[in-house]
Image (cartoon, rainbow, N blue to C red):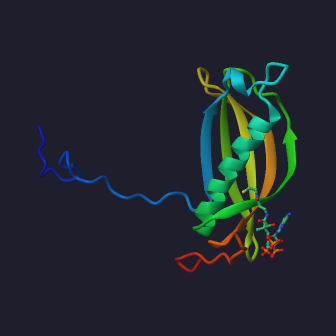
Amino acid sequence: MSDASTPGLSTPDAEPPILPAPRSSARMLELVFPKDLNGHGTAFGGFVLSLMDKAASMAAIRHCQGSVVTARMEAVDFHLPIRRGDAVALEAEVVHTGRTSMRVKVDVYRETLATGQQQLATSGMFVFVAVDEHGKPRPIVRQDGT
Ligand SMILES: CC(C)(COP(=O)(O)OP(=O)(O)OC[C@H]1O[C@@H](n2cnc3c(N)ncnc32)[C@H](O)[C@@H]1OP(=O)(O)O)[C@@H](O)C(=O)NCCC(=O)NCCS
C-alpha cells in the first residue's frame, strides 16, 4: 500500500511533468480509409503526399521553433502500394539546415497493425522555409542558441 508521500508517486490532481519533445523530427500514424483510395484500391498518391507534407512540416517547425512553409517537394519515390486497411507510419527528420531553409527526409511505411510488420512504401525529400509573421523567410535561430 502506498500513499501520496511515497517518492515517485504523485497525487491525483498534481500536474504531469513537462517533457521535452523531439527537436528536429516527427512521427505520425494514420489509417487508410476507403475515401483515401484510388481506382486500383490502393492509397491515392496525393493522400500520401499530404501526410508526408504534414509530418515533414512538424519536424521543421520543431527544428526552427516557428512557422514554416513548404518550398519544394523532391525525389518522392513510391516503392510499394499502400493497401486499404493498412496503417501508414511516417518518420520525418530535418537532415540539413540552411540560413532560412531546411531539408526534411520523410519515410513512409505501410504497416499491418495486427502483425506489426512494416515495409518502406514511399520516401521523399521536402524543403521548408522558416517564415516570419509576414510570410517572409527568416533566419533559423534556435532559442537555446543551437
Ligand atoms: C518559400 C518562400 C517563402 C521563399 O521566399 P523567397 O523570397 O523566394 O525566398 P529566398 O529566395 O530569399 O530564399 C529563402 C530560402 O528558401 C530557399 N528556397 C526558396 N525557394 C526554394 C525552392 N523552390 N526550393 C528549395 N529551396 C528554396 C532558398 O534556397 C533560401 O534558402 P537559405 O536561406 O537556407 O539559403 C516563398 O517562395 C513562398 O512563400 N512560397 C509559397 C509557399 C507556399 O505557399 N507553400 C505551400 C503551403 S505551406
Q: Residue at x 80, y 44 (%)?
A: 123
Taking the view exactly as shown, the residue that stands out farthest to the bottom is 145
Residue 22 at x, y percent in the picture: 55, 58
Q: Residue at x 31, y 52 (%)?
A: 16
Q: Residue 35, relative to residue 45: is it above or below?
A: above
Is residue 121 something that shows in the picture?
Answer: no
Residue 79 at x, y percent in the picture: 85, 35
Tell me which corner region of the image, top left, top right, bottom left or bottom right, holds residue 120: top right
The N terminus is located in which quarter?
A: top left
Q: Is residue 90 left or right of residue 98?
A: left
How many numbered markers are drawn?
Answer: 0
Q: Residue 38, relative to residue 66: is it above or below?
A: above
Q: Residue at x 76, y 73 (%)?
A: 98
Residue 110 at x, y percent in the picture: 71, 31
Judge by depth and name the residue closer to the eye, 133 or 51. 133
Judge by depth and name the residue closer to the eye, 117 or 12. 12
Q: Residue 107, relative to residue 25: is it above or below?
A: above
Q: Is residue 25 left or right of residue 75?
A: left
Q: Residue at x 67, y 42 (%)?
A: 90
The C terminus is located in which quarter?
A: bottom right
Q: Residue 11, relative to residue 65: is it above or below?
A: above
Is residue 59 something that shows in the picture?
Answer: yes
Tell me which corner region of the image, top left, top right, bottom left or bottom right, holds residue 19: bottom left
Judge by depth and name the residue closer to the eye, 140 or 20. 140
Q: Quadrant of ligand 1?
A: bottom right
